[in-house]
Image (tube, grey):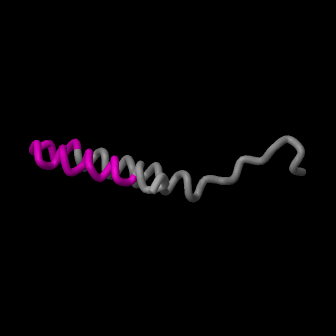
Amino acid sequence: MKGFLPWLTVLAVVLLLSALRLRALATVVSVGWLAWCIWTWFRPARRGPRSG
């Protein structure tokens, strides 16, 4: 459940913003979350000083 907490939080924020008719802001939050997820998935692994 702990791993789903950030996802559920973002989903709740997007739904709340959409319900408040702030759909542009909800879109920005959604796209920002998607960009962050892609960045953390595809970014090169950080290498320590001893790893060759």
Assess whether residue 18 is covered by the magenta stretch.
Answer: yes
51 left or right of 40? right
Q: Residue furthest front?
A: 1
Residue drawn 40% across the image and 54% down it? 34
Query: Any magenta on residue 52?
Result: no
User: Mainly helix, strand or loop, the magenta region?
Assistant: helix
Residue 17 percent across, percent down from the top left: 18, 44
Residue appearing at x 22%, y 42% in the figure: 25
The residue lying toward the viewer, choosing from 45 and 19, is: 19
- From the viewer's perspective, tell me whether residue 19 is left or right of residue 15: left
> Which quadrant of the rendered structure holds the N terminus?
bottom left
Number of callouts? 0
**Magenta highlight range:** 7-25
Q: Position of residue 18 (x, y in %)?
A: 15, 49
Q: Is residue 39 left or right of residue 49?
A: left
Picture residue at 24% right of the left edge, 49% below the top: 14
Give me the residue at 69% from left, 52% from top. Answer: 45
